[in-house]
Image: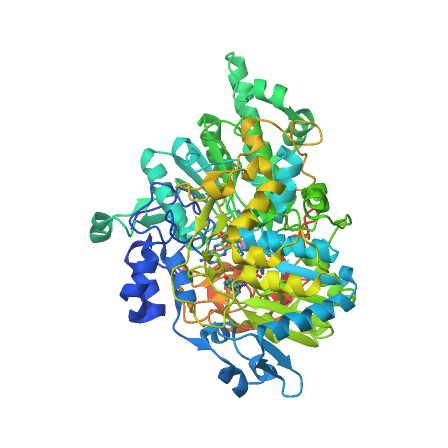
Amino acid sequence: MVQASRTSDVDADDTVEYDGPSGGWGSLEGIARIFGKEWTSPGVLNTLRRQNKPRGFMCVSCSWAKPADYHAFEFCENGAKATLWELTSRRCTPEFFAKHTLTELLDWSDYDLEQQGRLTHPLRYDSGSDQYVPCGWDEAFQAIGAQLKALDPKSVVFYSSGRASLETSYLYALFARVYGNNNLPDSSNMCHETTSVALKQLIGAGVGTVVFQDLSNCDAMFFFGQNTGSNSPRFLHPLQDAAKRGVQIITFNPVREKGLEVFVNPQNPAEMLTGKATQISSQYHQVKVGGDIGVILGICKHVFAADDKAKAEGKRVLDTAFIEQHTKGFESFEAKVRATSWDDIEAASGLSRAAIEGAAQVYVEADRVIGIYGMGLTQHVHGFENVAMLVNMLLLKGNIGRDGTGISPVRGHSNVQGQRTVGISEKPELVPLDKYARQFGFEPPRDKGMNTVETCEGVLSRKVKAFFGLGGNFVRAIPERGKMEAAWRDLELTVQIATKLNRSHLVHGKVAYLLPCLGRTEQDVQASGPQAVTMEDTFSCIQGSIGLRKPASEHLKSEVAIVAGLAKATLPPNPKLTWDAWAGDYGLIRDQIEETYPDKLHDFNARMFTPGGFYLGNSARERIWKTKSGKAEFTVPQTLSSTGFDDAPGRYRLLTMRSNDQFNTTIYGYSDRLRGIEGTRDVLLMNPDEIRRAGLSEGQMVSLISDAEDGVEREVGPLKVTPFRLPDGCVGAYYPEMNPLIPLSHHDIHSKTPAAKSVPVRIRA
Ligand SMILES: Nc1nc2c(c(=O)[nH]1)N[C@H]1C(S)=C(S)[C@@H](COP(=O)(O)OP(=O)(O)OC[C@H]3O[C@@H](n4cnc5c(=O)[nH]c(N)nc54)[C@H](O)[C@@H]3O)O[C@H]1N2
Ligand SMILES: Nc1nc2c(c(=O)[nH]1)N[C@H]1C(S)=C(S)[C@@H](COP(=O)(O)OP(=O)(O)OC[C@H]3O[C@@H](n4cnc5c(=O)[nH]c(N)nc54)[C@H](O)[C@@H]3O)O[C@H]1N2
Ligand SMILES: [Mo]
């Protein structure tokens, strides 16, 4: 095996570990294990062959780029799993619901619920039998519409998960606003909201500045808290190319993630036969959970020291011209960095000064640097500061707005970034409401709506009366499960639009509907013929997607048709709101989107099949800073730890993780192959020394209790103590099982993103 690490802080000997590379044969076996022979049948292979290609369909898993010069198979292990999950031959029919009450199904695991397969019929909750019973579409629309008309619009919430297309999202947001609110929380509120808020404030653009080509033009990449091997595996190809070019890849992650260590390209027969792996990270630093502010501050401190030295020789490390012309707040940032001691930096980060300086020297020497990150930075109480520190670091050497440089948040859901582009937001200032008013002849609500955490608060305080879920699994993805599920029962109305059964469909309001929709792989035929939809990837490129599979059931409707049907049944007639025509021809929806957003989405219908997608542009990439000051802004960190709580004896930092066998709350199976954890998700990961210090032993069953100082009892268990290479003081366990431990108030201060990566817990033996 290739030795990936130069800096390893925890010994591998006594821990569970997978000794294969990411990719390779293991990834093919990973697919076969879950789907058996089903996955190599011709129909399925033909579908997979069209995945992520021009005029094909865009993967329902992550939002990684769909490049114009694609591979023969432009899908990865987990993209294939996500597709196959939708293509399953299993069906969750009215007969299934006739056999099980919802109370009974509450005891089923997430895995078992989704294993029932695709939903086939629109369903209404029958309180007499405590079951879902089939109902007609029109009956559902009329009943929901009548109830919405009777409710105060401000008490209704329209959630969306980041999978719905641009066309659906645009109509959904329009429906909410004409109805009378901006209550449009989305999965991004639990995910990269930190990014949207921080980057908007600091560089004037709420999304990443990097484009796909930059990956081929950079000299170094700094990777913080993103698990490429499981969550965006197609990213491993450009990473492998970069590593082979000699690009320095410097990783900071409390977990030694396989995909960031070694990779065998499953599409390269020579690599597959010889097992020749590429080392991905040139340095791998196991930072303490919540230690990134300290790390990056240390990097910056070394940059200043190197700059002092260079000055003596008449040179500079800092890009002083850039700092002068383009930034604000440099002096106070510099003062703070110089004043912070290495002792404090080492304590906060859990890394040695030498290790941080080793990483920083790469930054000093590289001309073009990209900063990449995921949930490891965003899901903390001081997540904003995490992102701000990465911006600070990049600004020091003008690493934003040049080819081969920039900041690159790796977005999650396949269209989560796109939903924001077309109006899904609870923040009215981010949406061109005046345009909506003119275009559709109504007065849009101007007051701020509820985001995810505020929705939860509203459900608890009974201010929220009705909840719509456009996809997703809200009650399972949010924190504070105990209180939330109980309060959910008091909602007057819940409506879920979904492909598969999940827990959010069981935890329902007094009146409840479950409306089954087409998946993205399926053919969507409307009045004007077969339809296409569009998605935006993590690099701000928009591309069309066409499904060709026969729908899972003849009773399914498209998401567009469902939203249009609900809107029509709810809203007073308005000749400018042509819901039927829009549902009959999605090209007409794109015309409306173009009218609302002419700068970015002009010629939408003509450009939607541009190979590789068409680029929306990014002002910060052009060094136009749409911030309050008109400059890119340095931030002075107020703390070195992003956890938001103090260390205390017996208190651990819990990081909640995704396995290689899951997509968010969808559990495909019980193998976290790349981490060597097999057969169960009920584990508590901690390093062997920590196990001993806590007086525990390997294999012992324990539970975790929340250590928030709010007096609420929260406990999850039993969990099996499992030795795993993690820094001292940190423990790991799986999302969503651990969500009951996260207090609702434990979120990023600025964006309210739940702080799922550093939760204060204690162990109960
Ligand atoms: N197969 C698959 N693909 C997915 C998903 C999925 O569940 N399964 N989910 C999709 C979605 S919605 C999203 S948002 C993305 C999520 O993708 P990621 O952003 O990769 O999110 P996570 O897997 O939650 O964890 C990120 C990494 O952060 C590390 N980490 C935790 N705490 C810290 C810290 O304090 N500092 C640092 N530096 N690192 C830390 C963890 O060890 C982990 O490797 O993936 C998307 N793609
Ligand atoms: N502790 C902890 N909590 C977290 C996180 C964490 O890392 N740790 N991560 C957070 C993040 S990043 C996110 S994005 C959220 C995820 O939160 P959500 O996006 O709400 O959850 P998902 O699990 O992605 O939703 C899965 C469900 O979507 C439905 N579905 C699938 N495909 C379709 C479709 O095409 N149309 C429709 N209408 N429905 C469909 C299926 O019914 C499936 O059960 O969770 C957050 N919660
Ligand atoms: Mo996400």
Residue nearer the viewer, 420 or 277 = 420
Q: For this view, does 384 lie left or right of residue 535?
A: right
Q: Position of residue 328 (x, y in %)?
A: 67, 26
Does any portion of residue 498 appear in the rendered image?
Answer: yes
Q: For this view, does 450 lie left or right of residue 82?
A: right
Q: Which of the 4 image quadrants contains residue 327?
A: top right
Q: Position of residue 192 (x, y in %)?
A: 58, 49
- Please report the residue visible at 69 percent of the width from the left and 68 percent of the height from the top: 145
| Residue farthest toward the top in the current orientation of the protein | 314
Identify whether 380 is placed above or below 215: below
- Please report the residue visible at 50 percent of the width from the left and 12 percent of the height from the top: 313
| Residue farthest toward the front in the current orientation of the protein | 575
Which image quarter is the C terminus in?
Answer: bottom right
Residue nearer the viewer, 680 or 639 = 680
Residue nearer the viewer, 564 or 199 = 564
Does any portion of residue 161 appear in the rendered image?
Answer: no
| Ligand 2's quadrant | bottom right
Q: Position of residue 35 (x, y in %)?
A: 35, 69
- Please report the residue visible at 65 percent of the width from the left and 43 percent of the height from the top: 197
Identify whether 691 is placed above or below 415: below
Q: Position of residue 421 (x, y in %)?
A: 59, 45
- Which color scheme does this rendered protein use? rainbow
